[in-house]
Amino acid sequence: MVLSTFVFLIVFVLTTSWRATVRERTAEAAYPPTGEIVTVDGVRMHAQIQGSGPDLVLIHGSSGSLRDFNFGLMAELSRSWRVIAVDRPGLGWSDAAPGTDTISRQAALIRKTAAHFGADMPVVLGQSYGGAVALAWAVEAPDSLSALVTVSTPSHPWVTGLSMFYRLTAHPVGQAILVPLLSAFVPAERLVREVNSVFAPQTAPHGYAEHFGPGMTLRRKTLRANARQRAQLLHDITALSQRYNEIIIPVEIVHGDADPAVGLSIHAQRFESEVSSASLTVLKGIGHMPHHSAVSEVVAAAERATNRAGLRQSPPEPTHRGS
């Protein structure tokens, strides 16, 4: 009995590993890099560049990749900016590395990736978790960016605990046992439903979930990195929020008043009250994904930040002719 149980467990572990590997390879073949992979501080980082004009760096949220931006927003922004969208460490095609569970280390790697492509003083736009990374950039390297745009961004400590999913997948035992099971057996359709639910009360644009690449999110290394980052975020935000008075660059905040994930009053309104250079745009009835649900407002915020930073050339003065 003991022997048969042991054999079953070995077969199950091997089957799980094989199935997870097959699904990961299939996903990576279907969603190859859309940009260039460079090595920064020994870490492979993936970035996509599009357009021309002042530099604008985009930092995506949890569980995803820069594909969240190149579905539609990036094309709009590239009309007026040179846009550099970067996969955060451990997600998409960027590698995890020691220390990249923290928003500070992620900010440093993304900053150096942008600098690799010649963006030394960009405007930085971050959405959700990516906005927290952008805040770390602004606080810890203030002389390396010109302006900041935060979209649906957590900025202050919250009282709700970490969800059970992330508590389990961030724990070493969960990382060793639960994560491979998720990679191997969770139906892709389930993840598509989860992706779509993030848009509430709006609905996801047609084709978004398929473009986003659910299979990439289900890779073991991505699930592990994302869980560790989420588990670390509250600690990082608690410390960072004590330093917001150091931010003096132009800041544009975009936040929906129907965001069920990141509360307007807890985060955006409080952040505006503490940062003298911040200006808040509240989007009525909009949820957590305004960069898809209210694209024009997000683009307008990036334009205001760019203008406030003095990165646009002023139009020529009109020539006055005498009568």
Image (cartoon, helix red, strand yellow):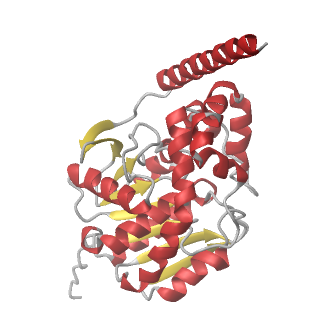
Question: Residue 292: image x %, image y %?
Answer: 59, 53
Q: Residue at x 42, y 73 (%)?
A: 304
Instruction: Using the rendered view, name the quadrant where residue 184 is placed.
Output: top right
Quarter occupied by residue 77: bottom left
Image quadrant for the N terminus? Answer: top right
User: Which of 292 and 14 lies nearest the eye of the viewer?
Assistant: 14
In this rendering, the answer to whether 312 lies above or below 213 is below
Q: Is residue 93 visible?
A: yes
The residue positioned farthest toward the right in the image shown: 1
Left or right of 66, for residue 180: right
Q: Tell me residue 24's x, y (percent).
A: 53, 24
Side of 246 where 268 appears, left or right = right
Q: Which residue: 41% across, 81% down?
A: 243
Residue at the image position 26 percent from the left and 54 percent from the top: 112
Vertical comparison of 162 with 159: above or below: above
- Residue drawn at x 43%, y 61% as measured from the top left: 103
